[in-house]
Amino acid sequence: GENVEQHPSTLSVQEGDSAVIKCTYSDSASNYFPWYKQELGKRPQLIIDIRSNVGEKKDQRIAVTLNKTAKHFSLHITETQPEDSAVYFCAAREAPAINTGTASKLTFGTGTRLQVTL
Amino acid sequence: DAGVIQSPRHEVTEMGQEVTLRCKPISGHNSLFWYRQTMMRGLELLIYFNNNVPIDDSGMPEDRFSAKMPNASFSTLKIQPSEPRDSAVYFCASSERLAGASSYGQYFGPGTRLTVT
């Protein structure tokens, strides 16, 4: 099965600086890579995702890059703000064995606790 | 759209009691996932359904856990008998059909915080 590793486990940055979180995956057939943000006591929320046919995707201050050859993908947050403080999870979606038009499961990384200090 | 709905939000029960967690997925979504989250083990997939059919239950920890999805708008996760080590936050998530979908994303409910004493 798929294995996702995420680094670092904790990250502290000053407000206004950039933050980068990196993930690697093991299954070259995985084709979808979402990122989730989870604030304390809340649900994981999808913040950005990328498919394997795209190398980079950006949404305002957040961006995700994907290197299929190296099997790694990264989350970039620029101009960090205190409200960016949360735990961030990467995930990889296994490609279904056949094209059934239905979902297959996500394998999550272990999370990165981001702290943005004033 | 109300999003994924879960009930109860909090459950405190004694060891040995039966616990039933409920989930209503987003309307139109045909895949439903049950997760458990703890500090020690992180976010674990327990089971998921496509079109109300269980596809992969390899994450269900033991026979005390069971899940059903009788129709497209309702699912239950049952623990019988419950044990203190079952204490965790249980999330339900749903996603839409992949064919033609704009996103493969899973959308999580608010979770049920279960405490077994």
Image (cartoon, coloured by chain):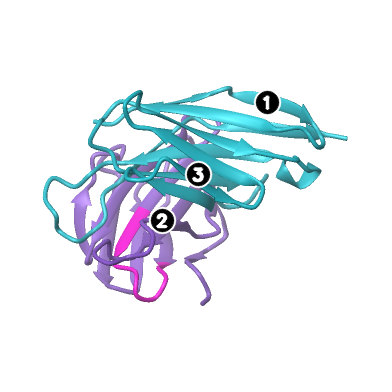
Specify the farthest residue to the left: A98
Question: How dense is the environment of label 3, judged by Cα within 10 Å: few (below 14), some, or many (20 and up)?
Answer: many
Colour displayed for chain B in the image of the structure: purple
Label 1 resides on the chain identified as A
Helix, strand or loop: magenta stretch = loop
Q: How far apart are marks 3 and 2 (CA)?
A: 9 Å
Is residue A115 toward the left or the right of residue A35 in the image?
right
Specify the farthest residue to the right: A118
Magenta span contains residue A109: no
Q: Position of residue B101 (x, y in %)?
A: 32, 65
Helix, strand or loop at mark 1: strand
Label 3 resides on the chain identified as A
Which quadrant of the figure contains the C terminus of chain B?
Answer: top right
Label 2 resides on the chain identified as B
Q: Which of marks 3 and 1 is nearer the N terminus?
A: 1
Q: Where is residue A32 in the image (x, y as percent from the top left)?
A: 35, 45
Which stretch is magenta? B24-33
Task: Name the residue: 29% across, 39% down.
Answer: B59
Quadrant of res B68: bottom left
Q: Which circle marks residue A11 in the picture? A: 1
Which residue matches tag 2?
Answer: B105
Residue A20 visible in rendering: yes
Which residue matches tag 3?
Answer: A35
Question: How dense is the environment of label 2, judged by Cα within 10 Å: few (below 14), some, or many (20 and up)?
Answer: many
Q: How far apart are marks 2 and 1 (CA)?
A: 25 Å
The cyan one among the chains is: A
Is residue A48 toward the left or the right of residue A4 in the image?
right
In the rendered structure, which amino acid carries the disc numbered 2? Gly
In the rendered structure, which amino acid carries the disc numbered 1? Leu
Asked if the residue under mark 1 is in contact with the one under mark 3, i.e. CB atoms within 8 Å, the reply is no
